């Protein structure tokens, strides 16, 4: 069986996620969420000094796992573009562009001298919406978790969650629902205290990267010519020397250009640096 | 002491404008509500899990707020289980993924009001 060549229309990827470090779009945000909910403890029972860790799972734990109450589940509901925050195509100067300096989702900038003329399109705002649920077997644990979720973990007002890539992302709690239920097992039916929180996180994805050949070759200036011409002869100079002539310095002698009205000129010849690979 | 006198015709015009504004706002709200209902039910019908509940989806006003959901007692628990999931099924949200649809409904409202009143005009006859 032969290897299939990577699709050149897609590869190289613009911002490939890192499955090991949990970096990149969606992975970094979910890792931040799990980190926020991890380490929460509840007292095992009233009057007892021991504490119980509250487990955190993506989706409801599978059947073969032994359920240890209380626990928290995270479900990704939707990934939506936030069109209201979209700007027109806005080209940013990389000299003052916001860019996480230690985010491996973007390639490193090329050498400084070849960065002139580089531009990058504005990031696209996206919204990630999750359902976060708490499951408790006792009412006391349920009220405790609800209390700290309301005040500290997922407060009413917008708050920021710092991701593993060092980016603080604004998060809003957009819904709360009590959804107590029953669990039927071989030993009988038990109450399950369940509370559901719906949260929305604002993030962004890049439209292109500095290494994109299109953005590089499209905007860099290779040659610039600034002729200083007698004002009265400018129209004649334009029609005779500039219009339709790609290289007027070499196509016309200095005498010809002087007769057409030129006093002097400034010319710059840049060098094309291959894009980073 | 300075005195400001308004002609009686202006008072009549203002009252008429207020009355017309109220009427057209109601028309615009009805249009937006129908639009939202059609959009949500269409989305429900395209989802195999929600399709059987599409006809039970309603849009109504409650405590001054526009609400979209399922009120029929025969279908409420099923809709709840679909929306929020359980230990067996993952959540399949319909009502929590309507952000763009609500914005589109708001645009329908604005479009009607703009069509009737235009911009910065006291009456449509100006």
Image: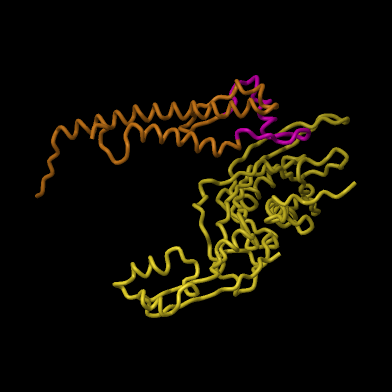
Please state which of residues A115 and A267 is positioned toward the viewer in this rendering: A267
Q: In this image, A128 relative to A259: left or right?
A: right
As drawn, the residue found furthest toward the left would be B1
Q: Which residues are magenta?
A: B69-95
Q: Quadrant of residue A109?
A: bottom right
Q: Quadrant of residue A23?
A: bottom right
Please state which of residues A12 and B4 is positioned toward the viewer in this rendering: A12
Residue found 72% across the figure and 40% down from its top: A139
| Residue B41: x %, y % from top left | 58, 26
Q: Colour scheme of this structure image?
A: by chain
How many numbered discs sit on the rendered protein? Answer: 0
As drawn, the residue found furthest toward the right would be A1
Residue A151, above or below B43: below
Q: In this image, A188 relative to B69: left or right?
A: right
Residue found 64% across the figure and 44% down from its top: A79
Please state which of residues A82 and A1 is positioned toward the viewer in this rendering: A1
Is residue B91 rendered magenta in the image? yes
Chain appearing in orange on the rendered image = B
Chain A rendering hue: yellow
Q: In this image, A114 relative to A254: left or right?
A: right
Residue A180, above or below A93: above
Please state which of residues A45 and A221 is positioned toward the viewer in this rendering: A221
Is residue B6 rendered magenta in the image? no
| Residue A164: x %, y % from top left | 70, 60
Residue A62, above or below A252: above
| Residue A143: x %, y % from top left | 68, 43
Q: Quadrant of residue B11?
A: top left
Q: In what quadrant of the picture does the C terminus of chain B appear?
A: top left
| Residue A244: x %, y % from top left | 45, 63
């Amino acid at each position: 069986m032969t290897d299939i060549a990577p699709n050149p229309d897609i590869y190289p990827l613009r911002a490939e996620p890192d499955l090991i470090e949990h970096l990149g779009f969606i992975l970094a945000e979910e890792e931040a969420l799990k980190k926020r909910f991890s380490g929460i403890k509840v007292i095992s029972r009233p009057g007892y000094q021991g504490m119980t860790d509250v487990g955190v799972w993506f989706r409801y734990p599978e059947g073969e796992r032994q359920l240890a109450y209380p626990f928290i589940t995270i479900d990704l509901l939707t990934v939506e573009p936030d069109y209201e925050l979209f700007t027109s195509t806005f080209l940013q100067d990389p000299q003052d562009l916001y860019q996480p300096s230690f985010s491996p989702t973007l390639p490193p900038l090329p050498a400084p001298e070849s960065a002139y003329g580089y531009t990058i399109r504005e990031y696209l705002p996206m919204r990630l919406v999750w359902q976060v649920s708490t499951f408790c077997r006792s009412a006391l644990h349920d009220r405790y978790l609800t209390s700290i979720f309301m005040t500290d973990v997922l407060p009413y007002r917008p708050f920021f969650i710092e991701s593993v890539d060092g980016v603080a992302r604004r998060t809003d709690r957009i819904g709360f629902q009590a959804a107590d239920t029953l669990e039927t097992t071989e030993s009988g039916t038990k109450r399950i205290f369940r509370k559901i929180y719906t949260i929305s996180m604002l993030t962004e994805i890049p439209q292109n990267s500095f290494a994109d050949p299109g953005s590089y070759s499209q905007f860099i200036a290779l040659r610039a010519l600034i002729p200083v011409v007698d004002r009265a002869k400018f129209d004649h100079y334009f029609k005779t020397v500039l219009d339709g002539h790609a290289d007027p310095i070499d196509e016309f002698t200095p005498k010809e250009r002087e007769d057409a009205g030129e006093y002097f000129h400034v010319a710059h010849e840049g060098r094309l640096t291959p894009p980073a690979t | 002491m300075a005195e400001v006198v308004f002609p009686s015709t202006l008072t009549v015009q203002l009252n008429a404008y207020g009355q017309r504004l109220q009427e057209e706002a109601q028309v615009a709200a009805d249009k937006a509500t129908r639009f939202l209902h059609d959009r949500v039910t269409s989305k429900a019908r395209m989802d195999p899990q929600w399709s059987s509940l599409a006809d039970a989806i309603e849009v109504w006003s409650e405590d001054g707020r526009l609400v979209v959901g399922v009120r029929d007692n025969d279908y409420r628990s099923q809709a709840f289980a679909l929306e929020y999931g359980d230990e067996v099924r993952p959540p399949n949200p319909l009502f929590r993924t309507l952000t763009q649809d609500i914005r589109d409904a708001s645009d329908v409202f604005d479009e009607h009001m703009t069509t009737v009143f235009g911009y910065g005009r006291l009456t449509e006859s100006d």
